[in-house]
Amino acid sequence: MSKVEKRNFLLTGFFFVLLMVGVWWAQNHLNAYLVRIFNTACIYVVAATAYNLVNGVTGQFSLGPNGFMAIGGYTVALLMLPLSQKQEVYFLQPLMWPFSAFSFPPSLFLLALVLGGLLASLVAICIGVPTLRLRGDYLAIATFGFGEIIIVLANNLIPLTNGALGIKGIPEYTNLWWTVNWAFWTVFALKNLVNSSFGRALKAIREDEVAAEAMGINLFRHKLLAFALSGFFAGVAGGLFVTLISTVSPTLFTFTMTFNLLIIIVLGGLGSLTGSTVTAILFAFLQEGLREVEAPHVIGSWTFPGIPGMRMVVFSAILVLLMIFYRRGLFGRRELSWQDFVNVWSRGRNVHGIS
Amino acid sequence: MSWTTFFQQLMNGISVGSLYALLAIGYTLVYGILGLINFAHSDVFMLGTYFAFFMIGVFLLPWWLSVVIGVGLCALVGMTIERVAYRPLRNAPRISALITAVGVSFFIENLGLVTVGARPKGFPRPELMKNVYFIAGARIQGVTFWVPLFSIAILLVLFYLVYRTKMGMAMRAVSRDMETTRLMGVNVDRIILYTFALGSALAGIGGVLWACKYPQINPLMGTFPGWKAFTAAVVGGIGNVVGAMIGGFIIGLAEILIVAFFPNLTGYRDAFVFALLILFLLVKPSGVMGETLKEKV
């Protein structure tokens, strides 16, 4: 391990400890509303960085993360829902066999999340094998279509998903410990992956597929692996989300979810994981902040009625304006590294050994 | 299934197929020229019905005039979208243009939700569409009969425009090679604007005819017809006008007949078309009428 690597490793470790202390403090001192926003922010971090791996780093325009999140969400819901609650919720048609017979105890929450992620990843491979051979735009429609198919299935497979009514009363296991840890380890894993030879291959594919292939990169295998990995983390994010709000229904994972993630990765910079992380957190707060726009206002003698749904208008306008005037987003393709912090810290000083 | 029900369903399929064909041509025209999936196309389709709806309901104009104004406004909206959102990105990476298209589509949909609300509204149909005809013992609604006839008439006008006029020739030239066409002294920007106007007008007409068939309109009504029409364009071979028409009829007939033969699959109707799309991309990505393009290095 070189000196720089050792320093970065120590800084990362230190940061992690600091983060955990922060979580401990937040769980005890912050109000429930703020904790909820932080939880949502961390779930967005997991989903957005994973989405960026496909869209930003590999340059394959996918529109289906809502489908993967739905798969993870439903899997976790079905595994974790207590048996008594299962009987209560499925009054239209009884629940299908394997899920009606058992329910995970709270201690197996992590396993449920991982299983949800793995299932989403498996489906990602199934959808990726046929579609990833296609050129860019066709991938976009195929993945969009796939996401819609998942929602249609969720609406119609009533013995499994309870249809449009959804599943209520999922135990609220998700707390800051879970979300912050998942966010941290997701970014950590993806960052190491992007900096590996595998990640460089992905970037090569983004820049020029033909040239990358000529250099001996197996296009299909690399794209598929990135897609599957992205599916895994999207599934986990879906599972975390469902156990945070304790309910799941098809409307939760419509195209709006994909659209939110798209805004996050574009705003942060396509291809920048740190950009996605920062903007995911910003976005969670912005989403709450813009509720102000939707609330009624009285300015002077004028009364402005609240306009529900105004947030999405603002977000889509932001997206279009960003694409036209500020395509690189906040970070472009740059990643924030410890070196940047060290540079700021030691500005004007002579730093030995590390340049 | 008796012969008369089959005949009814067949007519129904043709009528839905003709609407998909109208929409699919809009996608294919834009894709042929810019190589861009115009995600906002399905929202222009939705706007067409609302424009007509408000002309009839609020301004109390006669039905035909409302539709003409609505279609004109659609063409205007299409040109605005091109001018404001797509032209600045003409030379940008494909992914940027695609994201912009998704953004524009989402913007129109949500603006619609905010301004007119999510609750579906009833679309006033002319008497002509409400009549019921009996053909060979089958009971055929006026819409099922008139919608494909109107659509086919409009398609004929379109073929004339694309294959017999100077502007149509310029459009085909731009879709072949934009740079060379520019060198020939053609104002490429104007041709692209014209293409958007034409495609959006078709979407507007499609929207009004769609609303005659399914007289419930809401701001998200364009999404599924839009995707199915795009699928139709792909199935027909994207960039090819005749192909888009054939694809539209294939998708419409397949969808209606599947539901007719397997009534318990009705809920999966929308999923089925996407499955068909993926299947088609696997087997013949260039579509029925498409030519295989060599990738340029």
Image (spheres, coloured by chain):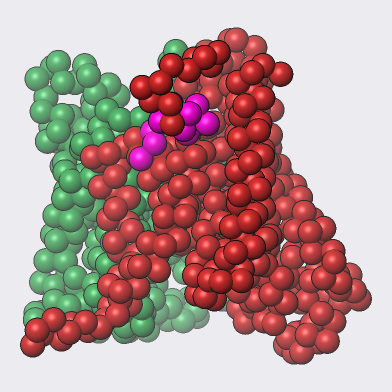
Chain colours: A red, B green
Which residues are the magenta region?
A330-344
Tell me, yes or no, if residue A350 can be seen here. yes
Residue B40 % position (x, y): 32, 53
Q: Name which residue lies at 75% across and 47% down.
A: A122
Residue A245 % position (x, y): 60, 74
Q: Name which residue lies at 16% across and 21% down.
A: B182
Determine the residue located farthest toward the front in the rendered image.
A349
Q: Is residue A348 above or below residue B263?
A: above
Numbered label tally: 0
Tell me, yes or no, if residue B235 can be seen here. no
Indicate whether residue A30 is drawn in magenta.
no
Q: Is residue A137 left or right of residue B146?
A: right
Q: Quadrant of residue B193?
A: top left
- Given residues B37 and B96, the one toward you in this image is B96
- Given residues B171 and B40, the one toward you in this image is B40
Q: Name which residue lies at 56% across and 71% down.
A: A29
Q: Is residue B151 above or below residue A200?
A: below
Q: Quadrant of residue A229?
A: top right
Q: Is residue A50 above or below residue B74?
A: above
Residue A271 % position (x, y): 48, 34
For the N terminus of chain A, which image quadrant? top right
Residue A32 % position (x, y): 54, 76
Q: Is residue A96 left or right of residue A65?
A: right
Q: Is residue B286 left or right of residue B23?
A: right
Q: Is residue B63 above or below residue B254?
A: below
Determine the residue located farthest toward the right in the rendered image.
A101
Q: Name which residue lies at 76% across and 89% down.
A: A88
